[in-house]
Image: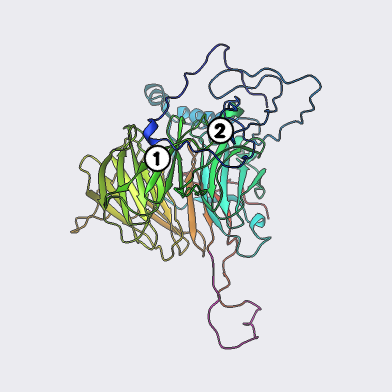
Amino acid sequence: MEAELPPENQDAPEPDQPPDSNLETNEDSEPAAKVLRLNGDQEGQGEAGESVAEPKFIGEEPRLNGDQEDQGEAGENISEPKLIREEPGPEDASSRLEEEARDEGGEAALEEDKSYFPTYDFSEPPQLLTGSWAEYSHLPENFLKGCKWAPDGTCLLTNSADNCLRIYNLPAELYAKEWGMIAEMSPVLHMAEGDTIYDYCWFPLMNSADPQTCFIASSSRDNPIHIWDAFYGDLRATFRSYNHLDELTPAHALSFTPDGSQLFCGFNKTVRVFETSRPGRVCETRPTFAKKQGQSGIISCIAFSPTQPVYACASYSKTVGLYSRAEGDPLALLHGHRGGVTHALFSPEGFCLYTGGRKDSEILCWDLRQPGDILFSMSRTVATNQRLYFDLDPSGRYLLSGDTEGLITVWDTSRPPSSDPRPALQPALQFQALWDCVNGISLHPSLPLLATASGQRKFPDLWDSGDEEEEGGRLPGTPKAPMSNSLLLWLCTSAAGAGLPQTAE
């Protein structure tokens, strides 16, 4: 697929430099690996240890800031890219849904409101379409650690215990009006990290029509932040943070700003801000705890408000902090969780913040118009320290979460909570997806599709029979359910039923 070239002579302004007092400008004592600027430029040689490899382009390739690169030298041997996108594009699937809505008499509504939301329907349990489980059966205990749809909905990103990021294409059968049998999904790209992956995220402006926007950020133990090319699977750039001893420090949380201009990274009592267009070690440091005041602990998650210049930092110290995006000034510190907070998510209108933690049985909904007030709570089972994701549909009405018992619960946030002393929202739907932990939940941005990731680390039960095995050859503690450690794709619409495809064995 060829990317559409932007108009010429559209230079983006240089990003503002953060204040000198907040910059970490000490350079490496030894040469660093060559990294590629995200906009195709090269870093100057004035900064020690910052050298950049010449990018390989096919003809003229678009840059992040809209400029065009010159063609490479004649005779340069460039291999064809391993594209992960498949034709037709995701617009075909969403257009088909719009046509069906018009057929049902909704044409006037679509014309009045041009913002399109997928028609999620949780009046009944979703229909299982397909998934990927053989991919994670080659190694013992290769359980998944979450999944995330790409912003344009063309592919799906997963993380697993083998320290590998995988990208799956949206099944081609879903682009057709009539579906046949859907085969098991297979990844099209593998990106291996050197150690345990702490966090990963998509570039928010990712668009398959522009390959330069197709990249992923990931952080892992004892490694810098890596930027992976989602078209080639190659390492595109690195961001490096160092402590006061000039030792490399890994980030525990990653999040791009909604406009993609900056990358916010969570550390122990600190948030560091990198300019997306400038890989390297230059960053702005924003302490969250100083003079025995503020938010302590490791920052485990960072989320941005879609409507206000505010971001939230979740901490393993059981707190959630609200900060101004421009300067990082603290605005509020929220208390109420029983365990370390591992996930935070703003509602689409920006009035509510949803947070959940490890070994904490509640997801809390905070009213940001009155910081500190809890609108309601939602109960789920979280019996381990594993990070369990939850997600909102694009309209903000439905919130979904898995738990350690294999249940998926759906809450309708438009319903009033119970009138208990502490208001609680009752589930609108709950169903048994697997007999294993469902740790990843991701709702498609434009289709009524739910992606789930499952698995957890298991320890054999204590038993007295020594070398003997149980009847049937299964050891205690071994999962009983099929498709444990799997990625599954579900259809969430009232049309689910007869005539839907069956998963190919």
Instruction: Give left or right: position of 457 versus 21.
Output: right
Discs 1/2, front = 1
The residue positioned farthest toward the top in the image shown: 9
Q: Which residue is mark 2?
A: 93
Task: Count numbered badges in the picture.
Answer: 2
Marked residue nearer the N-terminal end (1 or 2): 2
Disc 1 secondary structure class: strand
The answer to whether 223 appears left or right of 349 in the picture is right
Report the quarter where the N terminus lies: top right
Q: Nearer the viewer, residue 31 or 148?
A: 31
Q: Which one is in front, 145 or 454? A: 145
What span is in magenta?
457-474
Q: Position of residue 305 (x, y in %)?
A: 35, 37
Q: Amino acid at mark 1?
A: Thr
- Is residue 373 visible in the rendered image? The answer is yes
- Above or below, 471 against 170 in this view is below
Given the current orientation, which residue lies at the most extreme front position? 29
Report the quarter where the C terminus lies.
bottom right
Q: Residues within 10 Å of mark 2 (few under 14, many from 20)?
A: some
Q: Residue 144: where, in percent of width, then height?
A: 56, 56
Q: Is residue 426 visible?
A: no
Instruction: Measure the alpha-carbon separation of dots 1 and 2.
Output: 43 Å
The residue that label 1 is drawn on is 285
To which quarter of the image does residue 367 belong? top left
Residue 454: where, in percent of width, then height? 53, 58
Image vertical order of residue 458 relative to residue 221, above or below: below
